[in-house]
Structures are given as C-alpha cells and as structure tokens.
Amino acid sequence: MPKTLINTFAKKLIAWHGASGRSGLPWQNNRDPYLVWVSEIMLQQTQVATVLERYPRFVKRFPNVKKLAAADIDEVLAEWAGLGYYSRARNLHACAQQVMTEFAGRFPSDPVLLEQLKGVGRSTAGAIAAFAFHERTPILDANVKRILARLFAVEGAIQEKTTNDRLWKLASDLLPSCPEDMPVYTQAIMDFGATWCTSRKPVCLGGEKRCPFAKECQANLSGLVLSLPKKVIKAESPEFECDMLLMRFGNSVLLQKRPSRAIWGGLWSLPESSWAIKVSKKNMANPSLRALFKDILPEEKSAILLKVCKTVQRYKEIKHVFTHRRLWMQFWEVHASKEVKFSGANLEWVPLSQLGRYGLPQPIKLLLQGLSLVRGDDLKN
Ligand code: SF4
C-alpha cells in the first residue's frame, strides 16, 4: 500500500475540492443532522438534478424531525412520489419517529447509534456524523468504493465482504487528522467520485483535467482504470406481467393501498393481479369480467362489482423497469354504473381531482395523467 498516498490523500483532496469541487448545492454547508440525513437518503438512488428540485420541497413541507414524525405516512409517500425506491420514504418516516421516541428528538452524534436508526446504513451514518458533528468517521458509497478500488488496485468484487472490509479499512486510514476538516473532506470525496473519477470517463483517460492522484493511482499506473472496481456479473433481470384494473365511476377511480412490504409499498395504486412470469399473450382472448375480477379482487367485492359493471375493455400495456426486474402491466378499463361502497381490502374511490393527495407509483401516476378526464394540475401537488 503506498504510504505516501495514505499520508497526503486528505490534504490533496481538500485542496482539489477548493479548486474543482461542487458548491452551492442546497444541502451543503449545514450542520443540522435532520437536513443532512434527508439529503443523504434522497441522494442514495436519485440523480442530483432531481434532488435539487425535490429536496427543497420536501424540507419545506417537513422542516424538522418533529414535523416529519407527526405527519401521516400517506402525506410523506405523496411528497416522495416519483423519486422511486419508496422504502426510503417509509424508513424516513419510521426513523423520524424513532428519533423522537428513543432520542428525545435529537439525532445522536455517535455513528454506531446513528446506524441503529431505520434505513440508515453505515455509510449514511458516517456522512451524518461527519457533516453534522465533525466525527472522524468514513463514508463508503459507490463513488468512494470506485475511487479507493482504483487508487489501491483492489481487485476483488465489490459485493464481496472481504473486499468491502478492505475498502472500509482504507476509507478509515485516509481520513484527515483534524475533525474540523471532516465536512469538507467528506464532501470532497463524494464530489471527486461523482465528477472526476467517474465510472466511464475518469479524467485520467482523456480531456484536459489532470487528476491530482495520477502518479500514485495504482489502477492508472497499471492500465486497470476501467476494469476496476470489479463487479459480480448480474443474471438477466426476469420479466413479469400482471393485469391492472382501471375501474371508473363518474369522475372517480378505484385505488388500492399496497402492502407496506411489497414493491411500491404503502403507495396507492390500481388493483392488480399477482405477478406471473411473462408469457407471450399473442392471440389470447380478452378475459371475461368475472375472470378478471376473480384474479384481482377479494371474492365478496368481486361479486358486488359484477352487479354494476357490464363490459371490460383492453386499455394500454405498459412496461416498467425496476432495478432487478421488469414488469408488464396490462390495464383493463371497466365502468361501474353505481358507486359501490367498500369497507376493508384497502380499496377506495378517489375523485380524479384529489389524486394529488395520494402517493402513486410513477407509471400509474403517468397513466392517470394521460386520461383526458384528469386535469393537468391534479397530480402535480
Ligand atoms: S488517476 Fe484516474 S482512476 Fe486514478 S484516481 Fe485519478 S481519475 Fe481516478
């Protein structure tokens, strides 16, 4: 391991940040652990450009941990709609309640305690501790893993525990000695991975920028830059299909609240059948209303609805790509001639004018926006 790099890395990186790091991002330069935490969770699987738009809105609506903990989960999910990975929103809400009940409304500064909070992993705990409390504790997100794997030519697959342990050790060894430098250092290593030592076009492989670590970086010296970090090759993502019921009565649609542990957990969506491995539906006849309802609705609801619905029409088929799977949703449009009251089964008639109050999965939101009956602003609130 190059000792000089270990000793000089933090200083060089901080100097690099002064000249070339990102500045002016709304979540930078504050020590409020609540704001740091919200930005870190939002940035986990969302592009910076999107977070720039949504983060100010979220913290305006929920300005502190107390307000977020007291909010209804549906309100939080509605505000999160479109950002994807909805477990993050559910965890934010649960974590806020945990901070209120277990830590008297104050985030702990110890990264070990932070890591016990719902949805807070070791790297996020490190970021909160470093930014808000100036703790000398490392982060190790995907960007940092890439930088370290290249600098020190770590060749194991990054999903493997031994590789991860080694990267955590390196991340700790490289920290600046002065706690006051922790916020700028942490921001710098995030920025360096996001803008200079990028996955496909690191600056050392072309262009005019000169990497400050080019002469010490083991991957650069041995021509391994683009082959590090190594990843285990993923199997091809499976394809699923399901039927979805676009049930309408007047200006209302029938929505169903999804179980909290499912995909799009806790959001409101159109009632759907179980997912099955996709098969070609070419030449398949339309289902009867009875068969469709049987696949989608509880038996007693299906029996009631059959009395007020006469026909079913094939609507759109939409493909949605998740990280590890693809889902083909076939929508079936059915009109009810009378409003049927429901109790239980998490079913609710929702006027189109009120859809903006409900957290909806993005493809369902887009579909409903596409219905000519929906006013353009109904879903944007
Ligand atoms: S030399 Fe290239 S691979 Fe190495 S740290 Fe710099 S940008 Fe990254």
Image: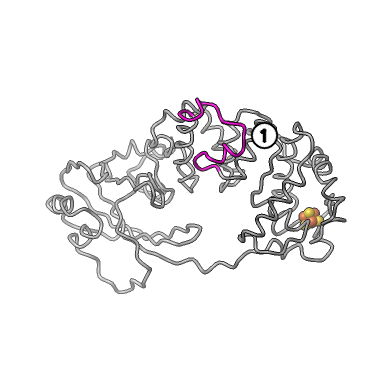
Which SS type dominates the magenta stretch? Answer: loop
**Residue at coordinates 60% horizontally, 45% vertically from top-left?**
122
Q: Where is the C terminus found, in terms of image quarters?
A: top left
For residue 241, side relative to residue 9 (left or right): left
Q: Which residue is mark 1?
A: 131
Q: Verify whether residue 115 appears in magenta.
A: yes
Say which amino acid is labelled 1: Phe
Query: In the rendered image, is residue 203 in sight?
Result: no
Query: Residue 31: x percent and y percent?
Result: 65, 28
**Residue at coordinates 14% horizontally, 50% vertically from top-left?**
304
The scheme the figure's colours follow is: one colour
Q: Nearer the viewer, residue 257 or 114?
A: 114
Q: Which residues are magenta?
A: 100-120
For residue 199, side relative to residue 354 (left or right): right
> Which quadrant of the structure image shows residue 78?
top left
Q: Verify whether residue 329 appears in magenta.
A: no
Q: Quadrant of ligand 1?
A: bottom right
> Which quadrant of the structure image shows residue 356?
top left
